[in-house]
């Protein structure tokens, strides 16, 4: 081709869509216009979701601070009645409960085909669990997926074990609530139990996991979840609820051990079902104050709820630190 036949606007040479003055063609412009509103709508929804969580958290914390300030003298008196030995015993029970949760997760992971030694499993679980204090529900599972991969655990398997924890803990927690607090006051929880029991059926779970992996275009799980593995995980979860009840009983023995087990289980379930705040912050405390109302005055109940939150955070940090130290010694 001669030089005179070269394109005048240079659009072909530059690889841009043909158009007057090098501008995109009408088809390209139409596609951009059609895609623009959809992209803007998706972006707006994402921004809204990100904004709702911190706003909700601030509102919850604000109302919580207002409730504490309004009952300040009673709260101070409630804390004054808490002894250091009682708080220490509460912390020991929390550590035992967290071990139960870790063994629940480890059982599920082993049943899916990735058995881990106790100490490496503890490090992956406890360090990953610290992510629940970060706004957004993805951080614990992402941390466990990455740390598990270093131990040869496929990401899909780590994710499956993580997400199976939720229905197991909810179902066992609601059943514990019904048994310990009575059917007359909390019988409405029965509405959720059949759904959760269906979701705990291994055949249903395996079908849901397979569907999710296909949608994500990932390889299916090599080993399906078994009924034996599910029952073992449920047993560890129930042991964890007992220890959490002992944790609450140590600082609030007025209602007895059975009442404490049910009170904590109910408040935890209500808190964990609120996905807008990290680790159910604020929601669990409000629920706990309400459940403790028959046996404690409002100031003492608030003090117990705040103490419970502080002790559990301390337990999470302690377990993560001890697991990290133990694993480092093994590799030294």
Image (cartoon, rainbow, N blue to C red):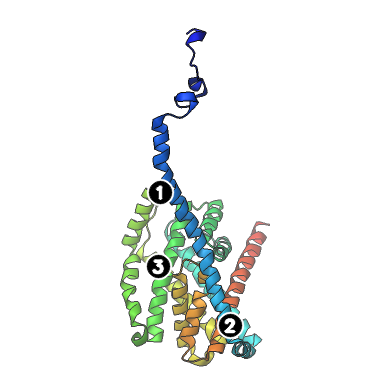
Q: Are marks 3 and 1 in contact (CB under 8 Å)?
A: no
Please report whichever mark, 2 or 3, sits nearer to the chain's N-terminal start: 2
Residue 180 in the image, given as x and y percentages of width and height: 41, 85
Q: Give the crowd class for mark 3: few <14, some 14-19, many >=20 residues within 10 Å.
A: some
Q: Residue 96's mark?
A: none
143 or 17: nearer the eye?
17
Q: Can residue 115 be seen by looking at this rendering?
A: no
Q: CA distance from mark 2 to mark 3?
A: 33 Å
| Position of residue 201 in the picture relative to residue 269 (left or right) | left
Report if the CB atoms under discs 2 and 3 are less than 8 Å apart: no
- Residue for badge 1: 216
Dot 3: element: helix
Label 2, secondary structure: give it. helix
215 w.r.t. 164: above or below = above
Residue at the image position 39 percent from the left and 31 percent from the top = 27
Which residue is at a point 56% across and 86% down the rendered structure image? 250
Circle 1 — which element?
A: loop
Of badges 2 and 3, the one in the foreground is: 2
In the image: residue 212, left or right of residue 124:
left
Instruction: Name the residue beneath numbered marker 3.
Output: 167
Furthest-front residue in view?
20
The residue that mark 2 highlights is: 68
Residue 91, can we see it? yes
Direction top: furthest residue: 2
Q: From mark 2 to mark 1, how far is it between C-alphas?
A: 46 Å
- Comparing labels 2 and 1, the label whose residue is closer to the camera: 2
Q: Are marks 2 and 1 in contact (CB under 8 Å)?
A: no
Badge 3 or badge 1: first in the primary sequence: 3
Q: Nearer the viewer, residue 44 or 295?
A: 44
| Relative to 152, residue 97 above or below | below
């Amino acid at each position: 081709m001669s030089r005179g036949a070269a394109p005048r606007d240079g659009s072909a040479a530059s690889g841009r869509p043909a158009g007057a003055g090098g501008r995109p063609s009408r088809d390209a412009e139409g596609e951009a216009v059609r895609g623009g509103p959809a992209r803007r709508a998706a972006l707006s929804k994402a921004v809204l979701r990100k904004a709702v969580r911190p706003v909700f958290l601030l509102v919850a914390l604000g109302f919580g601070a207002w409730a504490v300030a309004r009952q300040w003298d009673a709260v101070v008196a409630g804390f004054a009645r808490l002894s250091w030995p009682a708080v220490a015993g509460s912390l020991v029970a929390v550590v035992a409960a967290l071990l139960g949760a870790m063994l629940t997760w480890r059982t599920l992971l082993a049943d899916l085909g990735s058995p881990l030694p106790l100490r490496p499993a503890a490090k992956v679980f406890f360090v990953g669990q610290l992510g629940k204090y970060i706004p957004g529900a993805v951080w614990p599972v992402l941390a466990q997926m990455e740390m598990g991969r270093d131990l040869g655990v496929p990401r899909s398997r780590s994710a499956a074990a993580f997400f199976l924890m939720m229905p197991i803990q909810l179902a066992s927690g609601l059943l514990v609530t019904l048994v310990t607090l009575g059917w007359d006051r909390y019988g409405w929880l029965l509405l959720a139990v059949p759904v959760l029991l269906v979701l705990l059926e291994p055949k249903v779970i395996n079908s849901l996991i397979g569907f999710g992996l296909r949608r994500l275009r990932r390889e299916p799980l090599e080993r399906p979840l078994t009924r034996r593995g599910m029952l073992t995980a449920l047993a560890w979860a129930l042991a964890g609820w007992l220890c959490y009840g002992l944790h609450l009983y140590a600082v609030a023995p007025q209602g007895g051990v059975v009442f404490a087990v049910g009170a904590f289980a109910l408040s935890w379930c209500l808190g964990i079902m609120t996905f807008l705040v990290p680790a159910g912050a604020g929601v669990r405390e409000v629920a706990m104050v309400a459940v403790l109302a028959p046996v404690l005055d409002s100031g003492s109940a608030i003090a117990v709820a705040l103490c419970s939150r502080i002790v559990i955070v301390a337990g999470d940090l302690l377990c993560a630190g001890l697991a990290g130290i133990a694993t480092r010694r093994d590799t030294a």
